Image: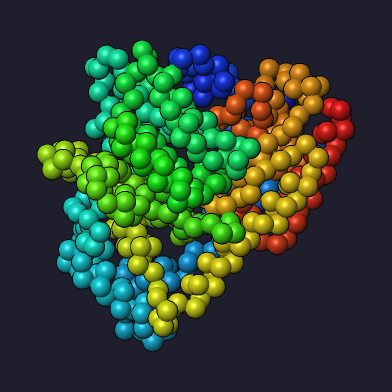
Amino acid sequence: PARLGSMLSCRRRASLPAPGRYSGRIPEWHTETRTDIKTVLQQAVGAGPPHAACGDEGVRRPYKEVIDVFQGDLHRAGMKPLTFVRQVLAACVYPPLINSSNLPLDVRQRAQEELGRCVGGSVGEGNVCGLMTWKKMKMLVVQDPQGGNILNVLVNREASPRTGVLIPVPCHNKTVLSITQLGAVAVPYYLSEEQGWALQVEELQRALESAKGVCNPVALYVINPGNPAGYVQSQKSVLEVIRFAWEKRLFLLVDELYQDRVYGENCEFVSYKRAVSEMGPPFSGTVELASFHSVSKGFSGEYVCGLRAGYVELVNLDPAVMKYIHTLFSKDACSPVLGQIALDLMTDPPKPGDPSYLLYKQIRTVLLHSVKKVHEVVNSLPGFSCPPIEGGLFAFPRLHLTPKAIQKELGLQPDTFYCTRLLEEGGVFTGPGWEYGQKEGTYHIRYNTSRALFKDIMEELLRRLSSFHMTFMKDFS
C-alpha cells in the first residue's frame, strides 16, 4: 500500500467494552473511532486476489504483493474447492454428466439422489428441502448459520430489565453487533488465555453476577472450536457448561462452525447435542440448545458469496415455540439449492470404500496438519506468545508491546498501530485484537492459519512477519 497516511479511513463502529472494568456491573458498550485497515488495503490494492498486487503510486516497497491473512475465505486464500463436492454439483447442474464415465460412480449416484429431491428433478425448479425439516437430522436449513433468527425469539425488546446474552471474550465482533442491534445486552465472560483460552465455569458465574440489576440473562453463547482464539473445548469443559446452563436456566447457543477443523494433539470435537443426550435425565430432556454449522466456514470452505448455506439444530424446545420458529424462518429467502446440496455432502461425505474417499481423505489430512509450522515460528518471536492452536481457522497470538510502542498510538489502539505498520512496511494484512475483545492491558493480532497450506506463501509470510517484528521491537525498545 502506498502513502498510508493519506489513506487512513476512520469510522465509528461498535466495539467490545473496556475489559476488566467491571465492579458488579456490565461495562457499557461504546463506539470508538478506529482506523479501518481493511479499507486501507482495499483503497491501496483494490479488491484483488488474496496475494494482492500492491499499488505503489511511485512509492517503493520491499514487497510486490500483500499477503492477506485477515479474511476467512479459504478459496480466496488459495485452497482449491473439494473435488467430490464440485463434481456432484457439476452433475446436478448438467445432468447428462450422470451418464459420463469421466465421473466416479459414487459422484454420479449422489447427484442422482440430490436431483431426486428437487422439484421437477432440476436445481432450477426449486428447493431440495427449503426451510422444511431437513431429511435426515431434523434440522432447519438457513442462509444465516449464526443464529440471527434464534436471537429474535429469545430477545424481548420491550422487557425491563433488558434481555442479556453471555458471550465469550474474545469473540467475533459481528456476534456482539447482532445482539446489541436487537436491543439486548451482551454480557462478556473472559476466556483464560493462560490456560489455552479455557472456558471456566467460575468466570461464567462472575459474568452472571455482574448482570444483576442491569439485564436479565436468558442465553449463553459458546464458540467451539474458537474464533478467533483457536481453542477446542474438552469433554469435561462441555459437560460443565451444560450443567451450568441447566442450573441457571440458560438457553445454550453453540457456534460449532469449525467442528471439522480440529488438528490439535489429543483434541477431539465434542458435540453439545450429543453430550446433552448422553448425560441422561434431567439434562437430556430439559436443556434447551441451538447448535449451528455451515458449509461457508466448515471444511468445505465455501465462503460468504459462494455456496452460502448452514443449519441450526434445535433441542428440547416447546412444540409451540418450534412452530413459531418455523414460521419465522420461512419469511426469509431460502438458502440456494446448490448450497443445500453442498450442505448435504458436508454432513454425509464419501465413506471408506467409495471411489472418492481416498482423495477426499488426503485433502482433509493436508488441511488439518498444516498450521503447526506457523504456530512454532510465531511463538519463537520475542514479544509474541500464543497458546497451542487446536482448531478453527484463526490464531490469536498476544503481543507483548513495549511502553514506547504502546504510547506511540497516534490516536490508534496499540494493536491497530502494530497491524497498520505490518501492512504498510511488511505487506502482511492482519486484524487487531481489540476488535474481538481482550483483557485490559493486553494486545493481540488475529490471522488466518489456512495460508500454511501453501509452502511458498507460508515461508514468505513467516519471513516477512519475523523481519518486520524484529525491526518494530527494536525501533520501540
Q: Between residues 354 and 191, which one lies in front from this camera angle? A: 191
User: Left or right: where does residue 398 sit relative to residue 365?
Assistant: right
The residue lying at 40 percent from left, 73 percent from top is 350
Residue 219 percent coordinates (x, y): 33, 32
The residue lying at 40 percent from left, 46 percent from top is 239
Q: Is residue 397 visible?
A: yes
Q: How many marks?
A: 0
Quadrant that contains the C terminus: top right
Q: Is residue 224 visible?
A: no
Quadrant of residue 198 in the image? top right
Residue 167 percent coordinates (x, y): 44, 32
In the displayed structure, 263 sits above or below 210; it is below
Q: Between residues 122 and 458, which one lies in front from this camera angle? A: 458
Residue 344 percent coordinates (x, y): 32, 63
The residue lying at 74 percent from left, 32 percent from top is 400
Q: How is the image coloured?
A: rainbow
User: Left or right: where does residue 269 sit relative to residue 372?
Assistant: left
The residue lying at 83 percent from left, 33 percent from top is 473
In the displayed structure, 279 sits above or below 85; it is above
